[in-house]
Amino acid sequence: MSLETLRPSPAFKDVLPIEYKDLVEHGPYTNRTDPSKQSVKVTDMGKFKEVIEEHPMCAGCAMTLFIRLVYIGMPNPEHTIVVGTAGCGRLAISQASVPFVYGNYGDTNAVASGLKRGLEVRFPNQKKDVVVMAGDGGLIDIGFQGMMHSWFRKEKFTTIMLDNEVYGNTGGQESGMTNQGKVLKMAPRGKFDKKIDALGLAKVAEVDYVARLAPTNPARVARTVRRAIMVAREVGHSYIQAYTSCNIEYSIPTPDVMKDAFAIEKERYGFEEIISPRAQEYLNEIEKKPKKKKTD
Ligand SMILES: Cc1ncc(C[n+]2csc(CCOP(=O)(O)OP(=O)(O)O)c2C)c(N)n1
Ligand code: SF4
């Protein structure tokens, strides 16, 4: 079997599905010379073919906006595999034109570790990006062990936590990321313990690129995703923690979802990046602006 990635024969171009052709000709599958640059921009949303266009999640759910931005931020979606699990996010993630591996709840980072290593053997000449995208419950609670070990081993993939601070998909149980005292449908006396400091854990594990953000600034989300994936591709592990409110379990009226995101960002979820020296060196290199030619 060839080690080359599948490439459709030009003779079959006309009969390829229109969706695929649009992704190549008017979307993010476009070939680009510099893999660190995106071929589509957040500011052009609505004008290009996106890898995710439909989802069955609740109307106005901030998680869906964030997931959409993640796919726009991917440097090479055509060479990316997303690993997810049970939870609200997979309802949208499974609709994207990017392969999706549905791991058992709690197994995502173990599955991604094996997948990434396997891809390196199978495609030695083609970088393949692996991204775990799962809920706070799936990662900090049931997937905690696998997640932490993948961080300590510096596995070359990205973990994205969709932190809605609750088990949304199963009707409102507290997670390790729920704030202390928060009353939820299935935590009627309020959560006893503190929100787990996942960023602090990532620091202890010396994860090469760590970022926390809310989906208030779409361009920043896309840039952060691109940086995280590029660091994972060449340097080590990367972790993004995103506030993706659950308007159902937190009773946020749909029109106020973004107002809530701005308020929480201001109060306790400000944008933060923690970058190791070797990751910073790599990012400086790929983000270096070409010098302007002097004109006489
Ligand atoms: C091993 C296992 N335990 C429990 C479940 C049931 N389950 C499905 S989704 C879910 C909670 C999801 O919460 P979270 O990961 O925070 O994602 P959210 O739905 O909030 O986005 C649970 C407990 C399961 N599918 N598998
Ligand atoms: S239950 Fe919450 S997190 Fe899940 S889709 Fe609905 S609003 Fe989003």
Image (tube, rainbow, N blue to C red):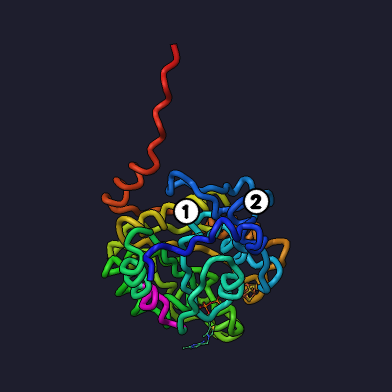
Give whichever of discs 1 and 2 has the lower sequence position: 2
- Mark number displayed over residue 67: none
Query: Magenta part mainly helix, strand or loop?
Result: helix
Q: Amino acid at mark 1?
A: Pro
The answer as to whether callout 2 falls within 8 Å of ligand 2 is: no
Q: Residues within 10 Å of mark 2 (few under 14, many from 20)?
A: some
Q: Look at 46% across and 84% down and name the residue there.
A: 104
The residue nearer to you, when weighing 228 against 46, is: 46
Residue 12: give x, y in percent of width and height.
Answer: 60, 60
Q: Which residue is labeled 1 in the image?
A: 75
Residue at the disc numbered 2: 48
* Residue 280 part of the magenta-drawn span: no
Q: Residues within 10 Å of mark 1 (few under 14, many from 20)?
A: many
| Quarter of the image where one finds residue 187 | bottom right
Ligand 2 located in image quadrant: bottom right
Q: Indicate the quadrant containing the C terminus: top left, top right, bottom left or bottom right.
A: top left
Q: Position of residue 270 (x, y in %)?
A: 48, 55
Residue shown at 55%/79% (left/top)? 87
Q: Nearer the viewer, residue 56 or 202?
A: 56
Residue nearer the viewer, 108 or 254: 108
Residue 37 at what x, y percent from top left?
A: 47, 46
